[in-house]
Image (tube, rainbow, N blue to C red):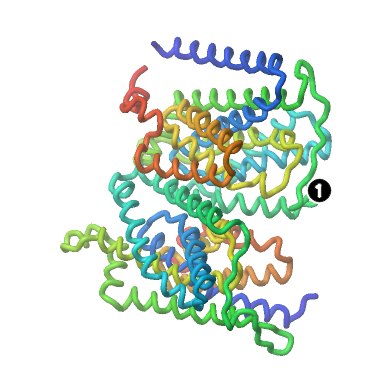
Amino acid sequence: MFSMDLLLGAVLLGVLLGCFYAAVSVGLSVSFGLLDVPHVAHPAFLVMASYGVYQLNESYDIDPLLAGLAITPLFFLFGLLAYRVYHETFEKRGSDAAVRGIAFFFGIAFIIEVLIILQFGVDQRSVSATYIGKAWRFGEMRIPIRQLVAFAVALALTVLLAVYLSKTFMGRAIRAVAQDEEALRLMGANPVRIKQFAFGIATAVLGIAGALLIIVAPVEPTLDRAYIGRTFCVVVMAGLGSISGTLIAAIILGVAESIVLTLFGASWAPAISFAMLLGVLAVRPQGLLGR
Amino acid sequence: MNKRSHSIAFWAGVAVFLIAVLTMTQIVRNEYPFFAGYVILQFIALAVAWSILGGYAGYVNFGTNAFFGVGVYTAVALFKATGAPLMLQIAAGAVVGMTLGFGVGLLTLRMRGIFFSIATIALAIIIETFVMNWRFVGGAAGIQIQRPPVMAPFDSYVKMLFFVQALLAVTAVSIARYIQNSRIGRGLQALRDDELAAECTGVPTLKLKLVACMISGGLISAAGAPAAMYLQYADPSSAFNLSYSVSALAMALIGGTAHWIGPVLGAILLGSTQQLLAVTISSEVNVLVLGIMLVLFVVGAPKGIIGLLRPRYRLRAGGKP
């Protein structure tokens, strides 16, 4: 039955969920929002990171968050490589290449999905840690500690990246390249190297985000499909490239999903993010907080 | 050859193909070739239909599965409600697909390419979720379909479906060929190369894109409509399977989208490889092969197989006949 407590609980869980969504979307906010790369394989990279964390946790009993941190440098290098390939084959060749760039990332996403299936099978996988499985109770409400951990780490990650992009020299260079690539070139900087570095950062963040993904709930190889909707919904709603907007948009999505889940049940949940995405695209394509 | 004799050759080829298909259904006793052939013909229809919007206009549609699933479920709902014959189911599927294409186009075709692509994925998931919650057609669990008795001159339902799918593939190819050689096709190519320039020179870009989206959507839904009869079963997660999207897109891009023959070649090549692999190896490897081929082609051979066969194809296709 509908009650105020129930709604309040849904909103609170939604905020926690939303911050987690911000963490998984913030990389896309850089790669797609700032760099304009049609990175539809972003969620596939994310799920791949989760499986990396799972493997480390399973074989060496490493805490999932530490495991996530451990694979971050690998993902940074992977991002550098991915951008290099994308740039050489598509960006350099001009407008006609855009179509194939999208198809390229779509193909990559599928390859990753199948490779994960071949390696780990289609079953769900989860990690073990001391904070997984317990919950705090506040009267009627029950908040899993895994949600709180994910919330705290996600919030820290998003804020850190926002500070990095606005305060450090390299961060400002990344935002500059997003604004006017030509101007940077005229000033003697190499925009391609900055973009490559930025794409590396955007991919490296996925190491931690992937750890959060598998902490919050078990993962399966095709999970990336649901996250295409969530991550792009957040990034588009935020207004392309706005990191603070990403946090706000992600919380809106999290609360919306949580409320629908409470009121209508789980079978409608997958459509929420996609419906919101369509709505934003149709009504306000520059995003709620567009630049 | 001039344009007219090209046309005669094309229609003669179509006639020969359909007669061959019909003869095959009368002579061959074993049903397996028809089972496998149906799938390949379906992929031809999907890839050609996809390339009308994705190839000519350069708008990458990830939502082939949305249109396919809508075709399947239009047929299922109509069949369950009224017991309508197959041809009526297909026609209804096409109409609903076109309507959907119109709606999607209106909503998203003003946007840059990538947003259109993302929006089509979104659409697929939303429609799938609705169908999952739609009790009348079985919800998430799916629905069994009892095939009606087969009509003469066919002696089995699969053979009839094979012939019907051949008709659909031929329809898709004829329409794609017509569009390619008409004002619509030239307009689409112009907006694909530079949308702003096309708009400025008076090409009605939005109208053309809408037409392309409607035709493409209608053809995909029509090709999907007989699938429930083919499988004697329909469920949301297989009717809206994302692999239809990858397949259609990959086959069209691997074949090459500058000419209608490209998607046909891509579908025949990859479709038959898939049928062979499905017998010998797992279905995962199947998708893997498709994905790797797609990536290799978009990186290494942007104009697809027809680009490899005839390096300066675009010059000839774009030049005077």
**Mark 1 element type:** helix
- The residue lying toward the viewer, choosing from B228 and B2, is B228
Check the residue under mark 1 and report the chain it is in. B
Image position, residue B170 (x, y; %): 58, 23
Identify the residue position indicated by label 1 in the image: B136
Q: Could you tell whether A150 is left or right of B149 in the image?
A: left
Q: Residues within 10 Å of mark 1 (few under 14, many from 20)?
A: few
Q: Could you tell whether A37 is left or right of B215 in the image?
A: left
Rendered view: A287 above or below B173: below
Tell me the residue at 34%/44% (across/down): A95
Q: Quadrant of residue B297?
A: top left
Rendered view: A74 above or below B25: below
Rendered view: B317 above or below B201: above
Residue B310 visible, this orientation: yes
Rendered view: B60 above or below B164: below
How many numbered callouts?
Answer: 1
Tell me the residue at 68%/27% (across/down): B32
Quarter that holds the C terminus of chain A: bottom left
Q: Could you tell whether B91 is left or right of A53 in the image?
A: right
Q: Could you tell whether B256 is left or right of B161 in the image?
A: left
